[in-house]
Amino acid sequence: MSTADYKTMTTAEIREDFLRFFESKGCKLYPSSSLVPDDPSLLLTNAGMNQFKEYYQGKRTMPEIGACSCQKCLRTNDIDNIGDATHLSFFEMLGNFSFGGYTKEDAIEWAYDFITNPEHLGLPAERLYMTVFEDDDEAIELWHKQGVPYDHISRLGADDNFWAAGPTGPCGPCSEIYFDQGEEFGCGGEHCGPGCDDCDRFLEFWNLVFTQYDRQEDGSMPELPHRNIDTGMGLERIAAIMQHKSTNYDGDLLQGLIGVGERLSGHTYGADAARDRSLRIVADHARAVTFMIGDGILPSNEGRGYVLRRLLRRAVYHGRLLGIEGEFLGSYVEKICELMGDNYPAIVESRSLIDGIVRAEEERFGATLDAGEQSLAAELETLGEGDALPGEVAFKLHDTYGFPIDLTREICEARGVSVDMEAFDACMTEQRERARASANRDAWGTFNDVWTTLSDRLAATEFVGYDADAAEATVLAIVSDGAETDRAEAPQRVEVVLDRTPFYAEMGGQVGDTGVISCEGARLRVTDTKARGALYAHVATVEEGALEVGAAVSAAIDAGRRELIRRNHTATHLLDAALKRVLGDHVSQAGSLVAPDRLRFDFTHFEAVTADELARIEGMVNAEIFAAEPVVTRVMGLEEAKASGAVALFGEKYGDVVRVVSTGESDEPFSRELCGGTHARNTADLGLFKIVSEGSVGSNARRIEAVTSMGAIEYVDERLLSLDGVARELKCRPDDVAERVAALQAELRETRKALEAATTGAGAGKVADAFRGAVELDGYKVVVARLDGLSGKEMRSAWDGIRDAAGGEPVACVIASATPDGKVALLAGGTDGAVASGFSAGSIIKEIAALVGGRGGGKPAMAQAGGSDPSGIDAALDAARAALGI
């Protein structure tokens, strides 16, 4: 099969062609959103549909039939595979989307047109294969309608071709498009075809997801109110295909970055498999790092910052494997800005920041690697050829210096020395087990292991804060800048470990305590308390004197702040119980925040909570508060606690002995939960519970924010103050505000109707004058007119007026307006009769939009566009007349 039977396109050409193609279909072009998503359920933007989530959920609507975008994405779930033929951490995702605006048939027709049309990709039809969900007969027939032979369409199961947001909720079949790279890439198996796991012959490059069902708890899948379309085509992958290459890394963009590595290292890409992998990894990671910093992400040891740091250090490490010395990533940043800055100007605008952060991180990690190399060199001096480096030594290099084991092995092999990997792996396993026991370590881990060392040496911190606000204690350790120190002086920021403490460490959603640690000659202001495994770290600033390890100190919490936290924590328990009673037993806590000024509670639920439900929930909680039930805490065995009906958090791990917190003394209290936090002594302490907001935080998850006690009083006071201000503006009593607003809204509606009738109604002077100037063409009349002062929405009303004035006769229009905000609105429309006679609104708008500084398109019967240059309106209308032959 020839590799030259279709044309070649650059990445930039493909990106531009894709976006313009779908714009011409009426899809609105959206710029790429940030790698930092608005969705709190996501760490990083990982798909093109992320920014359209609220449209899929029906929370927002768009006037256009759909959207298209080229979205920058970042995924690191398969980071160990990055550097092979297909996996990338950073990539661009081309996508077109519909939220009920266009159909599944449209999506398939347009996809096939874009792929096979010589004006676009022009890929040979015989090299295309489609997979569909095994039960999706509709998709098979739609592909066949486009000319795809049945033997080029195959059915795959739910694991491959069915997308779902979760166990319940929106879901639907997928259809993937594959490109046949040729028999030389095949495995030769009898059943080799699209989806084959044994070879790379059939390369999947575009996935069309048809979200058309709403899966229920009972497994049934009724149709959604409207069908959604969500497609994704990896730009790097289609670029490789269009450039007659076999891997993502062989396209022009990534080859440009690999070229930087060749220049810096002196190695030639394609000469050695191991070096090729390192060249790929550095190119990929450098691009990811550049874009992450450009979007405001900074290196840290948690969350997004940790992902950034890990990618950056991995790039530095593979640079070392290539023999690149010193700070070198700045050269990649320069090339990335050159190659991609036109499309993503943020990286150019942030160039100095990116360079500075990259340089500092490289220098820091480079020093770590240098220290590790020196230590390894000293160990190798004691070994001869054929010996083995002890696994414990290799682990120490990894654990103390962050020295990668692969680099250790490469250096050792060059000296004829092996590494005892069995012992190394045993040390790693032991460390992972210690890490799992640390509640402080998040899902991304950390490079700082000082707390692991302390945990091995020190006994667990004794927490005495359930019953005491102050305690005498001994300083066991002081940590500064990630390292142990024996002494801290003002104004140093440190983390202090005590043998016993009244300070509650942040966990279970409850924020850490603040307060004061003091002794003779020193005073520290504690601003937070964190759990470091079994140790409590008091995050503090030395305000006076100096503190030393071994000192006897007094530790006192901010009792007033703790009291507010107690009340809000008890409120979360009452809220959880009320949610289960009102919404159902499927409600489960999915996260929480308990702070002194507010509480936040995330829970599983499948739809928005109604106003009536919120009122019932709030009423239940307040009823418990007004009942003045004692809050009772008992310590018991886990199985006994579960038997008592105590609620446990899903996925949480508990010890054999647990604390059970109940409201009331009865056998069946309103609330009973396993909880290690601090609580009010009586529900009456909460005073008042008020829900502030309710909303979605992801698929099948909702969030309620609320206030109690002083926070509730402040909230009510602010609302009353606002109400009084509105009443003053409306010149009425606060009790009459709602009635007054309703009257004003009614008045505004009538005014708008009158204004619309005066400007755009069928009998309005402007429309009437325009229709009187209609020109008779072959089979229909056409109005070409300028109607200044109308918005885009009002232009549609003007078209309705023209159509009404035609009295059912075939008619079309091309109208333009200098809008009130100084922009331009263009509209072309035609009745079915006009379209049948040859009128095409989309073609007209596409031809004239550029004359007013815009672009647009649409269907033959209706098309709109916006522009920024009102001075070009007359020229645009003249161009329309010329196109129509007037």
Image (cartoon, grey):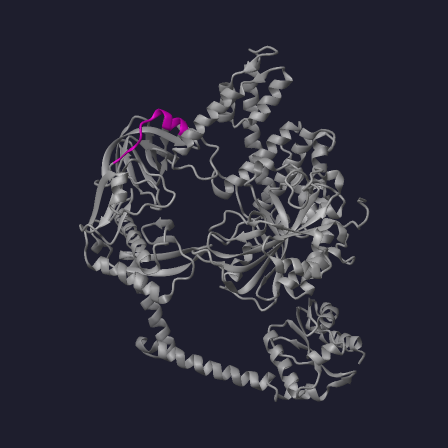
**Residue 496: x %, y % from top left:** 34, 33
When asked about the image quadrant of residue 583, the answer is: bottom left
Closer to the camera in the image, 657 or 773? 657
Q: Which residues are magenta?
A: 452-463
- Is 669 displayed left or right of 206 in the figure? left
**Residue 137: x %, y % from top left:** 62, 58
Query: Where 835 sits versus 373, above or below?
Result: below
Query: Where 801 sits versus 126, above or below?
Result: below
**Residue 270: x %, y % from top left:** 74, 32
> Which residue sits at x=66%, y=84%?
802
Residue 191 appearing in the image: yes
- Is 605 displayed left or right of 840 in the figure? left
> Which residue sits at x=36%, y=79%?
739
Residue farthest along the front direction in this orientation: 190
When asked about the image quadrant of residue 407, the answer is: top right
Question: Within the magenta stretch, is there residue 603?
Answer: no
State which quarter of the image contains the N terminus: top right
**Residue 143: x %, y % from top left:** 68, 58
Residue 30 appearing in the image: no
State which quarter of the image contains the C terminus: bottom right
